[in-house]
Image (cartoon, grey):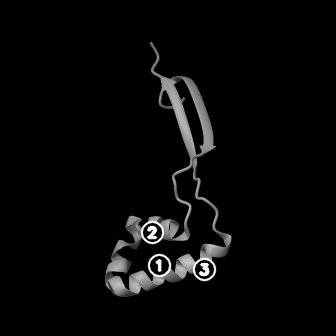
Amino acid sequence: MAHAAGLADIVVEERSVDVGVTEPEQLVSYRLGQPLFASWLDSIGPRRAQRIASLAADVIRPIMRPYRPTVVFLAASTPA
């Protein structure tokens, strides 16, 4: 895509990034905080939403590892 955009001197690297999410509650909060869940969480109300978040954290606790998403880094220049 970088070539198709007319960029030059392209360097692309994929690497995992430590975003500081190490606890199940943090990961559940991050995921449920995404826009696609907003209307559903609103419709079930804060008490049920908290209960679901708590249950989800309990389910992933035994297998939780720090969340380190893979990020694509792109560096390039425009042709002279």
Q: Quadrant of the C terminus?
A: top left
Residue sitting nearer the eye, 37 or 46:
46
Give me the residue at 33% from left, 85% from top: 45
Residue sitting nearer the eye, 43 or 66:
66
User: x%, y% of residue 2?
Assistant: 52, 32
User: x%, y% of residue 5?
Assistant: 47, 31
- The residue singled out by tag 2 in the image is 29
- The residue singled out by tag 3 in the image is 59
Give me the residue at 37% from left, 79% from top: 41
Asked whether the beta carbons under mark 2 and mark 1 sit within 8 Å of each other, the answer is yes
Residue type at tag 3: Val
Q: Rate crowding at label 2 as few (under 14), some (14 to 19) or many (20 or more) other CA atoms within 10 Å.
A: some
- Confirm whether residue 73 shows in the render: yes
Residue type at tag 2: Ser
- The residue singled out by tag 1 in the image is 53
User: x%, y% of residue 69?
Assistant: 57, 53
C-alpha span from label 3 to label 1: 10 Å
Residue type at tag 1: Ala
First-in-chain label (2 vs 1): 2
**Residue 9 appears in which quarter of the rendering?**
top right
Q: Rate crowding at label 3 as few (under 14), some (14 to 19) or many (20 or more) other CA atoms within 10 Å.
A: few
Position of 69 relative to 11 (above/below)? below
Q: Answer left or right for 58 relative to 46.
A: right
C-alpha span from label 3 to label 2: 14 Å
Q: Which type of secondary structure does the marked residue at label 3 adopt?
A: helix
Q: Which type of secondary structure does the marked residue at label 1 adopt?
A: helix
